[in-house]
Amino acid sequence: MYAQLKTFGLLLFAVAIAACGDDGNGTAGGGGAQTSTVTGTVYFYEEGYPAVEGATVEVYETSLSTTTDSQGNFTLEGVPHGNRFFITKAAGSWGLVDYWYVPDETPNGGAAELLVVRDAEVASWATAIGRPINDNHAMVDVIFQEGAQGGETATIDADSDPPFTFSGWDAVDQQTLIADVDGFGELVFPNINPPSGTVDAEVMPARCFIDESAGLRYPIFPKSVTIIYTLCE
């Protein structure tokens, strides 16, 4: 993960994790597992990035959960170190499932900036690609963060419809990647069914690879977009 990333054609600041534990020294209380406090804001994916009041932010496979305030801000204390998925949810929107290694993947200050995607935005993607996107199913977004040249492909080990890509803000019904001048692009796999469990991806050609820890698998949920990060050399 990098200090900046793009999601659905947008440039966002990455999650910033304050590496201070529940007892102030990076441990949870009396010498337990190391933890960190994560603060940030949830935004709608749309022009102007309005903050989302009342969004839920959860840490996968923990009991940690909180709700954003009127400014869209949240704080999660005691987040265990290691591979962690942050899950956002909001009424009338698709949530996101985003992966971070806590606390190593920390940018130069700031706070977590997470997204939800309004139902109307997802409906516009469906219109653009000429295919329905079922909000009872899941989606996976394979993000090529850098080095892509265009024409790259990906597969996931779950039943889904063929992927689509983006040209700027616009969804395009094309199963190979459209990359921008910075080598960034996305392949989105809609209508994953059943929309539960975990998935993994493979990317082609061989100069591209999934940016993850060995053996990591990505959780999926109904009406959520799970992010899988990719690099190309």
Image (cartoon, grey):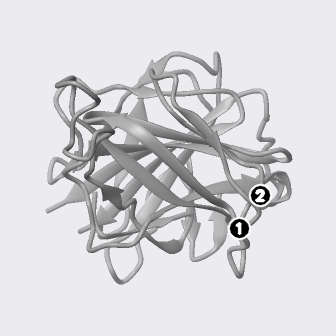
The vertical placement of 24 against 147, above or below, is above
Residue 94 place in picture, x, y as percent: 72, 45
The residue lying at 34 percent from left, 50 percent from top is 229
The residue lying at 35 percent from left, 25 percent from top is 217
- 37 or 170: nearer the viewer: 37
Count of labels in the image: 2
Q: CA distance from mark 2 to mark 1?
A: 6 Å
Residue 108 place in picture, x, y as percent: 26, 74
The vertical placement of 63 against 207, above or below, is above
What is the three-letter code of the residue carrying label 1?
A: Gln
Q: Quarter of the image holding residue 193?
A: top right
Residue 31 place in picture, x, y as percent: 17, 25
Is residue 156 in view from this perspective?
yes
Residue 223 place in picture, x, y as percent: 71, 35
What is the three-letter code of the residue carrying label 2?
A: Glu
The residue lying at 29 percent from left, 52 percent from top is 230
Mark 1 Cα within 10 Å, few/some/many (few <14, many 20+)? Answer: some
Q: Earlier in the sequence, mark 2 or mark 1?
A: 2
Q: Quarter of the image holding residue 101?
A: top left
- 9 or 66: nearer the viewer: 66
Q: Relative to 92, is 233 on the left or the right?
A: left
Q: Relative to 128, is 49 on the left or the right?
A: left
Q: Please give the residue where the numbered disc 1 appears in the rendered image.
A: 71
Point out which mark residue 36 bears.
none
Point out which mark residue 53 bears.
2
Q: Secondary structure at mark 2?
A: loop
Image quarter where the N terminus lies is: bottom left
Is residue 129 in view from this perspective?
no
Q: Secondary structure at mark 1?
A: loop
Image quarter where the C terminus lies is: bottom left
Mark 2 Cα within 10 Å, few/some/many (few <14, many 20+)? Answer: some
Cβ–Cβ below 8 Å for labels 2 and 1? yes
